[in-house]
Image (cartoon, grey):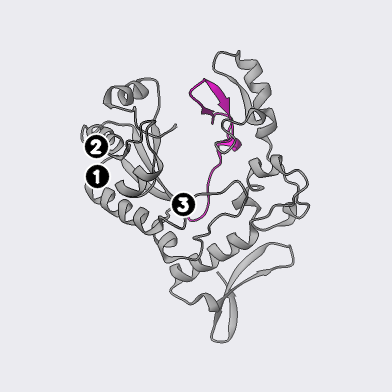
Amino acid sequence: MVSNGYLLDVDKLVLLEELGFSSIQVTIDGNEEVHDSRRVLRDGRGTYKRITANLDRYLISHRPMRIHINLVVDESNAESAVREKMELEEKWRGKNVSFYLSEITSTKHDEYSLASSDTYINNNPAEGVSVCTSHGDHNFIIDFKGDIYKCITGAGDPDFCIGNIKDDLQSIRVGQAKYIEPRSNNKNCSSCGFLPVCKLGCQYYTIKNPLAEICNKDKLKEYYLHLVARKNGIKVTELEIVDDDETREIIVAKTIGEWQEI
């Protein structure tokens, strides 16, 4: 379950436990100043203190449900998000909580890439692999009206609504059917070595742009080159991505004048 955390007091979190939830994700946009400049109430008041107080009271009670803190990152808040991550990790050390950074993607598909930055690589345990809610049978986004979506980016867009919580289960299953099998408009996807990572890319953009051959291959290459370089203690210039005879792309490192697969 994903929530902004504002209304999740201890009683509601315990209720979610009793309903069978094993984890919940709460999104924070950096430190208090940055977060409150973006996530405000109707009257303009910030939400950071209420959200973190809710989580603090729950975590210190040592409850079994795991809290995942998603720190949303873009060009303007990267450093504050990392500092906030480190501060919250120290504050809640030993508690049932995990942290990760996620890049924000614009509706124009021109996302700010932190792929090659030390900030992102050092603070992102997912190592570039993410799971989209559209890919799982039991993943849903529910808005304040009870409308159900498979895509968090498409929430609020009638084209992506698959039903309402008041609908019968069969009609909801029919609505979600088009998301179960990811699709791509790019004919090169089937032979790409990054397919297991990108999983045919963002389904929102594919559906919204049926004629566009969207591909994040270059971004993924950049990310993994820097990740492998850092983990192996070598320079990015000593790495290269090549295709082998089976069209599987591999990362190789140059050592003593020769290339060796990593």
**Residue depicted at x 66% and y 64%:** 249
**Residue depicted at x 42% and y 66%:** 118
Amino acid on which disc 3 is placed: Ala
Q: Earlier in the sequence, mark 1 or mark 2?
A: 2
Q: Earlier in the sequence, mark 3 or mark 2?
A: 2
Q: Nearer the viewer, residue 68 or 205?
A: 205
Residue 158 picture quarter: top right
Local SS, label 1: loop
Q: What is the CA distance from the residue labelled 1 to the residue labelled 2? A: 8 Å
Specify whether residue 78 is painted magenta: no
Mark in the foreground, 1 or 2: 2
- Tell me where the magenta segment starts and ends, as one range: 127-151
Q: Please tell me whether residue 108 is drawn above or below residue 148 in the rendered image.
A: below
Q: Nearer the viewer, residue 256 or 230?
A: 230
Q: Return the residue at label 1.
A: 92
Specify whether residue 137 is painted magenta: yes
Local SS, label 3: loop
Q: Return the residue at label 3.
A: 126
The N terminus - image quarter: top left
Q: Return the residue at label 2.
A: 56
Provide residue 17's location: percent of width, then percent of height. 35, 24
Q: What is the CA distance from the residue labelled 3 to the residue labelled 2? A: 24 Å
Confirm or deny contact between disc 1 and disc 2 (CB under 8 A): yes
Q: Residues within 10 Å of mark 3 (few under 14, many from 20)?
A: few
Q: Please tell me whether residue 253 is drawn above or below residue 72 in the rendered image.
A: below
Residue farthest to the front? 43
Q: Nearer the viewer, residue 257 or 207?
A: 207
Provide residue 203's location: percent of width, then percent of height. 65, 41
Image side of residue 44 versus residue 2, left or right: left
Provide residue 4's location: percent of width, then percent of height. 40, 34
